[in-house]
């Protein structure tokens, strides 16, 4: 019986996985500069956490979650996103009690959604996200957006578009909600069944509908910006001021919304304008929320964050023909001739690796010429040739593969010889 990978998943093989490692390491280094600390949460949680944290009216909760019962009949769900788990941990571990706030966290890990697989979208995907919890300062909003933009730019993306909007505070959203209901209600029968349910439940989510996005009422729907009170306008102006001060270009898009009630003030998306990237251009989405911690049993805590798919990031890099500076070379390849030399190479290889060198040898009993070809495939900087005669003299022939220069050195000097060369290359 043969097995195939489940639909909507992928194997990431050597040669490709190095790109993932480079992107993830870049994200971690950037978070370190911004003082965001990594958090690792379970891959599955109680289903109710996502129903509350993601929203019972969302497509994710209603249609896309991988949910199962454990042996005691409890409903569990593979996490579809990272924010709910991060905030749950923030509340459960009482991180809000730390004297230094905001609490700045990031995560990288697999998420799961049962949706139609397409380019850059999988049922198991890797999400990188950050959450800043405990501050109402608009400077944190600008910081979060800046970090996301910096990641894409550091990796070499240029065809980027940042769009921002304000959802206002609770009073602003209530006024806008009333206006949306009045706008859509007379003709709601012309909309899909999902939108009809959303009218009273969450009218803002009508604006996110893909089926009815071309309906004429969508184009004339009241903008949230028309209902911002003075405090909300001032907050949004500050965010824009800080982005401009950081030299980050942006566009204000009144149609950019977040449907859940606890979202407020800043919302943003980063898109790719690269030719051939595809119809779905969004790379990253984020926004401010002030009621999520309270929704899952904690104190009311302001927060803001974003999440992005590593798969879509890599697809954007491909669309812009960005080559990541990934090195697959090794420091030294040991070529052996004779049984005693082969035996000595085993321990010599171990010593080299323990000293921090990337080293390899032949394990297939190849001829000398084939071993040199293998060294080329490994992009070895040096080839160390060891035969039984050299072993008897306690020397090893070391060839610099860039210059072609070869010299004999004492075997116990090989490691220091290679490290001295590496040190010179760094200067």
Image (spheres, grey):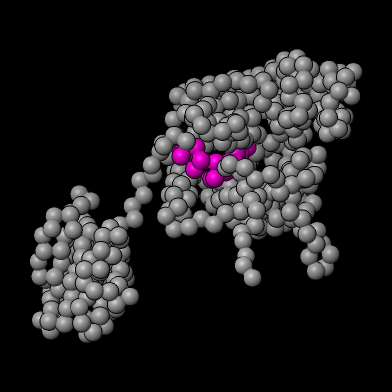
Please give the name of the residue rendered at 53% of the width and 33% of the height, measured from the top-left corner: 277
How many dots with numbers?
A: 0
Position of residue 35 in the picture relative to residue 39 (left or right) = left
Q: Is most of the magenta stretch helix, strand or loop?
A: helix
Position of residue 397 in the picture relative to residue 202 (left or right) = left
Position of residue 171 in the picture relative to residue 380 (left or right) = right
Residue 173, quarter of the rendered image: top right
Return the x and y of residue 21 as percentages of the image width and height. Answer: 45, 52
Return the x and y of residue 218 as percentages of the image width and height. Answer: 75, 20
Establish if 243 lies above or below 401.
Answer: above
Q: Nearer the viewer, residue 41 or 275?
A: 275
> Residue extending furthest front?
1
Say which quadrant the N terminus sits in.
Answer: bottom right
Return the x and y of residue 172 as percentages of the image width and height. Answer: 75, 22
Establish if 413 lies above or below 242.
Answer: below
- Is residue 387 inside the magenta stretch? no
Please give the name of the residue rendered at 48% of the width and 57% of the height, measured from the top-left corner: 13
- Residue 202 visible in the displayed image: yes
Residue 158, quarter of the rendered image: top left
Please give the name of the residue rendered at 65% of the width and 38% of the height, measured from the top-left corner: 303
Residue 254, quarter of the rendered image: top right
Q: Nearer the viewer, residue 74 or 367?
A: 367
Please give the name of the residue rendered at 13% of the width and 55% of the height, measured from the top-left corner: 403
Return the x and y of residue 397 as percentages of the image width and height. Answer: 13, 70
- Residue 351 visible in the displayed image: no
Establish if 370 lies above or below 272.
Answer: below
Position of residue 373 in the picture relative to residue 37 (left or right) = left
**Stretch of the chain drawn in magenta:** 304-318
């Amino acid at each position: 019986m043969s097995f195939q990978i489940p639909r909507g998943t992928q194997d990431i093989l050597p040669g490709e996985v190095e790109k993932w490692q480079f992107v993830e390491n870049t994200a971690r280094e950037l978070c370190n500069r911004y003082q965001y600390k990594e958090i690792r949460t379970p891959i599955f949680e109680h289903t109710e956490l996502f129903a509350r944290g993601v929203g019972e009216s969302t497509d994710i909760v209603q249609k896309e979650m991988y949910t199962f019962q454990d042996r005691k009949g409890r409903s569990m769900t593979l996490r579809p996103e990272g924010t709910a788990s991060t905030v749950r941990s923030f509340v459960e571990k009482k991180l809000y009690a730390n004297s230094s706030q905001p609490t700045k966290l990031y995560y990288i890990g697999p998420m799961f959604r049962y949706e139609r697989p397409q380019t850059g979208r999988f049922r198991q995907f890797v999400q990188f996200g950050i959450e800043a919890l405990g501050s109402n300062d608009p400077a944190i909003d600008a910081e979060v957006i800046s970090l996301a933009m910096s990641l894409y730019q550091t990796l070499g993306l240029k065809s980027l578009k940042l769009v921002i909007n304000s959802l206002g505070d609770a009073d602003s959203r209530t006024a806008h909600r009333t206006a949306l209901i009045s706008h859509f209600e007379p003709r709601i029968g012309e909309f899909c069944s999902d939108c009809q349910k959303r009218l009273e439940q969450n009218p803002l989510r009508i604006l996110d509908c893909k089926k009815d996005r071309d309906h004429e009422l969508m184009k004339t729907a009241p903008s949230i910006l028309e209902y911002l009170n003075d405090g909300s306008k001032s907050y949004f102006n500050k965010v824009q001021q800080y982005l401009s001060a950081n030299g980050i270009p942006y566009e204000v898009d009144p149609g950019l919304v977040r449907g859940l009630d606890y979202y407020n003030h800043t919302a943003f998306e980063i898109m790719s304008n690269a030719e051939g990237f595809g119809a779905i251009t969004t790379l990253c989405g984020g926004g401010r929320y002030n009621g999520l911690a309270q929704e899952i049993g904690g104190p009311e805590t302001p927060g803001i964050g974003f999440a992005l798919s590593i798969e879509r990031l890599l697809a954007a890099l491909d669309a812009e023909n960005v080559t990541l500076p990934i090195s697959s070379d090794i420091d030294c390849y040991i070529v052996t001739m004779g049984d005693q030399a082969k035996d000595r190479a085993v321990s010599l290889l171990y010593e080299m690796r323990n000293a921090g060198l990337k080293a390899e040898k032949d394990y297939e009993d190849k001829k000398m010429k084939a071993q040199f070809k293998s060294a080329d495939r490994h992009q070895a900087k040096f080839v160390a040739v060891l035969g039984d005669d050299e072993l008897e003299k306690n020397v090893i022939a070391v060839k610099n593969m860039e210059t072609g220069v070869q010299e004999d050195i004492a075997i116990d000097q090989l490691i220091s010889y290679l490290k001295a060369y590496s040190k010179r290359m760094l200067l």
